[in-house]
Image (cartoon, helix red, strand yellow):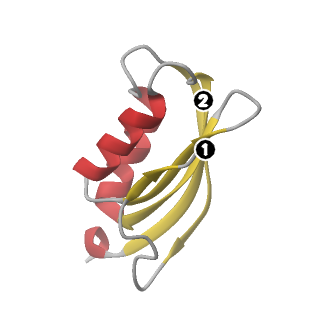
Amino acid sequence: MEGDTLICLDYEVFGKVQGVFFRKHTQAEGTRLGLVGWVQNTEHGTVRGHLQGPVAKMREMQQWLQKTGSPKSRITAAQFHNEKKIQQLDHASFQIHK
């Protein structure tokens, strides 16, 4: 079933996404959806990370990263790269990287 297929992808979110608890909210939403991976700030003022999980939950998270974010964030764009099917999860949880 397509929704049970595991995938991974990298993402980067642009806009006002630093200093607005974006990483904390991303970690909470990813964990709520049962996804694993990581999130971190970049020196360019963006937030980037890596996600792994079932396709259906990954699509929900992509929508969240594009449209919702943290309450005080202002997202102008979200890019997703390197999507591929995986056999198993490489991460045990969703981490915030400094």
**Image coordinates for residue 61, horizontal then vertical, percent:** 37, 46
Q: Residue furthest bottom?
A: 87
**Image coordinates for residue 88, horizontal then vertical, percent:** 40, 83
Sequence-wise, which precedes: disc 1 or disc 2?
1
Compared to 54, does 43 lie above or below?
Answer: above
Looking at this view, is 77 or 20 the one in front? 20
Occupied quadrant, residue 65: top left
Does residue 37 appear left or right of residue 77 in this picture? left
**Image coordinates for residue 45, horizontal then vertical, percent:** 70, 27
Around disc 2, counting alpha carbons within 10 Å, would you say few (fewer than 14), some (14 to 19), or many (20 or more)? few
Does residue 45 appear left or right of residue 19 in this picture? right
Q: Secondary structure at mark 1?
A: strand
Q: Quadrant where the C terminus lies?
A: top right
* Residue under pointer 1: 48
Q: Which mark is residue 32?
A: none
- Residue type at mark 2: give it: Ala
Q: Secondary structure at mark 2?
A: strand
Looking at this view, is 29 or 64 the one in front? 29
Q: Residue furthest front?
A: 98
Tell whether label 2 touches label 1 (CB within 8 Å). Answer: no
Occupied quadrant, residue 54: bottom left
Compared to 33, does 64 lie above or below?
Answer: above
> Which residue is painted at 36% across and 33% down in the image?
25
- Residue type at mark 1: give it: Arg
Q: Residue furthest right?
A: 44
Total tally of numbered discs in the picture = 2
> Which residue is painted at 42% across and 28% down in the image?
67
* Residue under pointer 2: 77
> Which residue is painted at 38% across and 74% down in the image?
6
**Image coordinates for residue 12, horizontal then vertical, percent:** 62, 42
